[in-house]
Structures are given as structure tokens and as C-alpha cells.
Image (cartoon, rainbow, N blue to C red):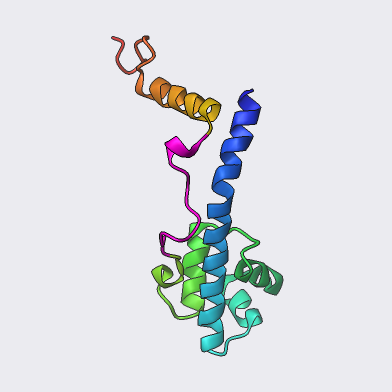
């Protein structure tokens, strides 16, 4: 059951994660094309392949944070200019109340365990 709950929880956040990378890619592409820069130029600037730049612009390749800074430098932008905002009409992580009862109960039990409220003293409280 744990595996099912984990997969279910993972699927609920995937739409949002995919949206973030797609929006980042759109912003990168717009900044690059506004400056009439090629994907090849950006790739050389940051030390990636042209194919990687294509995949990043399409939201198909996830990147480490430091690469986002390098990409921003390549297109003469601030990293925050490439980061998508979180408008209310875009996919977002679900609220706890939006999950089905078994998933919600499992999540609540995990939070209680993390807080040490399961009736047992947590290691940090024991002396």
C-alpha cells in the first residue's frame, strides 16, 4: 500500500513540476531569440550540448540550480527573469484536503511521526 500511496502522491505534483520546467524553457527561449542568439552559442557558453538547450527550452530536461544561473548569464538576464511565477490559474501542488482519504490519512501520519506526536517520544526529546 505504501508504494501505491507514494506513486499517487508523486503523480499529484508532476503536473506542477512539468509546468515549472516548461515555463522556464519558454522564458529561456524568448530571452535567447530576443537577442538573436543561437542554441549553439548558449550551449557553448554554459558547457552543454545544443540538444540539451533544445530539451531545456522544451521543458524536457531538468537542470541543477547553478545551470539556471549560467543560462541566465548566457542570455544576459537575471536568473529570476527566467523563473516562472506561480499564478493562481496554473497547476499547483494539492492542498491536503484535496487528496483521497487513504492518501490524506497516510500523509497526516507521516507528519505526526515527523513531529514526534505518535505517542512515543522522538529521539530529540529523549534524554
Say which residue appears at 71% left-offset and 71% top-offset. 51
Taking 88 as reference, is 95 above or below it?
Answer: above
Residue 13 among those drawn in magenta: no
**Residue 4: horizontal and vertical position, in percent?**
65, 29
Instruction: Using the image as rendered, state which of residue 15 and residue 61 is in the foreground.
Output: 15
Say which residue appears at 40% left-offset and 73% top-offset. 78
Q: Which residues are magenta?
A: 85-99
How many callouts does the rendering have?
0
Taking 115 as reference, is 41 above or below it?
Answer: below
Say which residue appears at 43% left-offset and 77% top-offset. 77
Extreme bottom residue here? 36
Q: Quadrant of the C terminus?
A: top left
Say which residue appears at 50% left-offset and 65% top-offset. 68
**Residue 104: horizontal and vertical position, in percent?**
48, 29
Is 65 on the left-hand or right-hand side of 115?
A: right
**Residue 28: horizontal and vertical position, in percent?**
53, 74
Q: Quadrant of the N terminus?
A: top right
Residue 96 among those drawn in magenta: yes
Q: Quadrant of residue 47?
A: bottom right
Taking 34 as reference, is 68 above or below it?
Answer: above
Instruction: Using the image as rendered, state which of residue 41 and residue 107 is in the foreground.
Output: 107
Per the picture, the main secondary structure of the magenta-coloured stretch is loop
Amino acid at each position: 500500500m505504501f508504494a501505491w500511496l507514494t506513486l499517487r502522491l508523486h503523480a499529484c505534483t508532476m503536473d506542477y513540476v512539468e509546468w515549472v520546467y516548461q515555463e522556464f524553457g519558454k522564458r529561456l527561449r524568448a530571452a535567447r531569440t530576443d537577442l538573436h542568439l543561437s542554441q549553439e552559442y548558449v550551449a557553448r557558453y554554459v558547457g552543454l550540448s545544443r540538444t540539451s538547450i533544445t530539451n531545456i527550452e522544451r521543458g524536457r530536461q531538468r537542470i541543477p540550480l547553478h545551470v539556471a544561473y549560467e543560462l541566465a548569464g548566457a542570455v544576459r538576464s537575471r536568473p529570476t527573469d527566467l523563473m516562472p511565477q506561480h499564478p493562481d490559474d496554473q497547476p499547483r501542488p494539492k492542498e491536503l484536503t484535496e487528496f483521497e482519504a487513504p492518501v490524506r490519512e497516510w500523509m497526516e501520519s507521516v507528519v505526526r511521526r515527523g513531529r514526534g506526536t505518535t505517542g512515543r517520544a522522538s529521539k530529540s526529546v529523549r534524554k
